[in-house]
Image (cartoon, grey):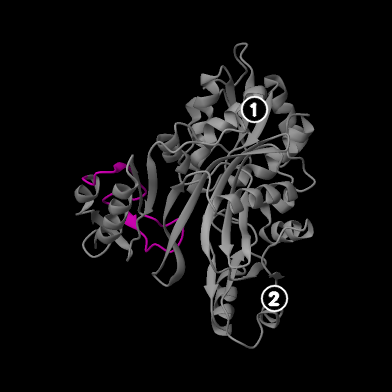
Amino acid sequence: MSSTPQGSRPVVAIVDAYSTASHLAPLFHARGYDCLHVQSLEQPPAVFGATFRAGDFLSTVVHRGDTAETLAALAPYAPVALLPGAEIGVELADVLSEALGLRTNGTALSNARRDKFHMVETVKAAGVPAADQILAGDLDTLLDWYGPDDRTVVLKPVRSALNDGVSFCGTRGEVRAAFEALVGADSALGLRNDALVAQEYLVGAEYYVNTVSLDGKHYVCDLWKTQHLGVNGVRDLLGGSSLMVPRGPEQDLLAPYAFSVLDALGIRNGPAHTEVKLTPRGPRLIETGARVCGAMLPLLTRAATGESQLEWTVLAYTDPEAFEARRHTDYEVARHAVCVNMVAPEAGKLVDFPKLAELRALESFHDVLLKVRPGEEISRTVNDLTYPMLVHLLHEVEGIVTHDYMTARHLDGEGFYDVV
């Protein structure tokens, strides 16, 4: 890995190229660009660090808290674009891209793009319908907002990712317990939870709207409908997600709503992953991340449609004219796709997955992303950090994918995990 600029190829800088964003650099390379990595923290969270591919980058510039110092380190590379990779890099990418005069979302609304409370408040201030909520730094404030009668609410850290710390509460006692467990603790990103966001529970199906924007013009790369389970003490644990065709009654509500959220949050350039519920009152925002979709889902999208949010992100930054020319064309689902989230019922040392061969034998089986391997410690699945594996299903016939999805859900039970 070089520590100095090389060659005459233009350079793209990616801040925190972890998780799904680790797949961006090879796509930039294919279009004639070299990549520079910017690390927003001196010590990145362990959950992200393992996915970094150092060989894809000319070098890594480590941000040590001094913006001027980081800009000086970037200067020899003269980046023509700078974008965030993982969630933790969003704010620094805003600062650096704005300072360099590159395409940017700017810093004016950076906090609203990362702080889950201010995100929803900013959206509502723009006239976009969103959930009732409160920012609670003390228990009395939270319980006053909750009221005397039992109702379901959601508590979550102000800044986190991967559904870490998200708690569904149906009584004052549960609200109290969740508050006491979360406030003062560190999130999955290593950030101390000094306060919580409490929101009304939104009733309805949950969807993902993955987009790429260029100068305020948005494109829907893919839409997903999710399915949830009540399991392991979690009311709404993600059990899987199904790729949707681009048009239909649900889609025609989701896309315009997501665009209005992007506009409200100032996401004018680059990728975004927006989670929305369709309630009886219409679409309501769960949250938006100003970065590519996680969990390697774009890899499955690419297999189903021929391209994904990754390719569209690279296109927007390297060939704006081509992006604009293609922006009005919907994606096409050549093969139906489902991502199955397998759910471990208990913690311990994993000996084996006795039924993994049956899973691989499914007609629509495409790939499996193992998060835990035999010999390692497995956790009881309670959030996005603790899924033992993700199974990708893919087939031209939707019915076969649905059949195999249900079969995988059945296999993911007694006897699937040999744990001691």
**Which residue is drawn at the image coordinates 70% and 56% (left, top)?**
119
The span picked out in magenta is 361-387
The secondary structure that dominates the magenta segment is: loop
**Image position of 159 with respect to 367: above or below:** below
Q: Amino acid at mark 1?
A: Tyr
Place of residue 306 in the rendered image (x, y in percent of width and height, measured from the top left): 44, 31
| Mark 2: secondary structure | loop
Q: Nearer the viewer, residue 76 or 23?
A: 23
Total numbered circles = 2
Q: Nearer the viewer, residue 349 or 331?
A: 331
Q: Nearer the viewer, residue 252 or 117?
A: 252
In the picture, measured across the screen, residue 121 lies left or right of residue 39, that is: right
In the picture, measured across the screen, residue 255 lies left or right of residue 52, that is: right
In the picture, measured across the screen, residue 15 lies left or right of residue 332, that is: right
Place of residue 418 in the rendered image (x, y in percent of width and height, measured from the top left): 22, 59
Instruction: Sort mark 1 into few (<14), some (14-19) or many (20+) by Cα contacts within 10 Å.
Output: many
**Image position of 157 with respect to 374: above or below:** below
Cα–Cα span, label 1 and label 2: 44 Å
**Which residue is drawn at the image coordinates 38% and 39% (left, top)?**
335
Place of residue 369 in the rendered image (x, y in percent of width and height, measured from the top left): 36, 44
Nearer to us: label 1 or label 2: 1
Q: Write down the residue under mark 1.
A: 317
Residue 373 on the magenta span: yes
Q: Write down the residue under mark 2.
A: 138
Residue 376 on the magenta span: yes
